[in-house]
Amino acid sequence: RGFNTIIQTLSSTYLTPADPRLHLSTVVHNITSTPENITIHNRDGTCISASHAITTFSLGVLKSPLVTFTPPLPPWKTSAIEKMTMGTYTKIFMQFPHDKIFWNTSTEFFLYASPHTRGYYPLFQSLSHADFLPNSGILIATVTSPFSAIVESQPLETTQNQVMEVLR
């Protein structure tokens, strides 16, 4: 489920789940590379040296000064990063009473294609699915730009009415 599955599958040939070389939730502030190795400098003062490293920084982090690279990334790479844009992604969580669950909980995702407006509440995910929170009554609606900005600035009641109209 998700991109972490790709990383876990690829790394499973050389990295076990409890491997001490795996550092999660570690705040990095500098990556220094030489022809011989890479040293990762963490905010807590610790350093990690290795022959290779995989970074999973978001585009927002790469565009910010939060992490520096020594030597700096090459111009072709920084140019590519600057040309990319981040979109807004909004999740709307709804919880229905257990006796009011109206969708097939064996289906995880529902897609909606508005006949009038592309991107109008196009994706729903059921957390009542057996793999998540069975019988929770939780349904997530997802919207992206430009609807994220609209949904985030309008009254909750308006969003609620729009989502319910799509679900009906």
Image (cartoon, grey):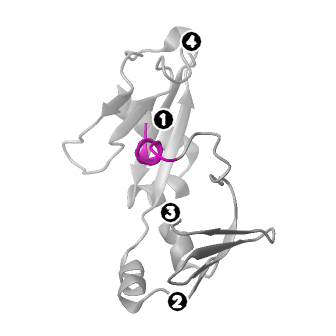
In this rendering, which labeled residue sits more in front, label 1 or label 2?
2
In this rendering, which labeled residue sits more in front, label 4 or label 2?
2
Q: Counting residues from the N terminus, which is met first, the one under dot 4 or under dot 2? A: 2
Q: Which residue is mark 3?
A: 54
Q: How many angstroms separate mark 3 from mark 1 (CA)?
A: 31 Å
**Between 155 and 92, the one nearer to me in the picture:** 92
Q: Counting residues from the N terminus, which is met first, the one under dot 3 or under dot 2? A: 3
Q: Counting residues from the N terminus, which is met first, the one under dot 1 or under dot 2? A: 2
- Three-letter code for the amino acid on which mark 4 is drawn: His
The quarter in which the C terminus is drawn is top left
- Three-letter code for the amino acid on which mark 3 is drawn: Ile
User: What's the magenta region?
Assistant: 1-14
**Between 106 and 118, the one nearer to me in the picture:** 106
62 lies left or right of 6 = right
Q: Which mark is residue 140?
A: 1
Give the residue furthest to the top.
99
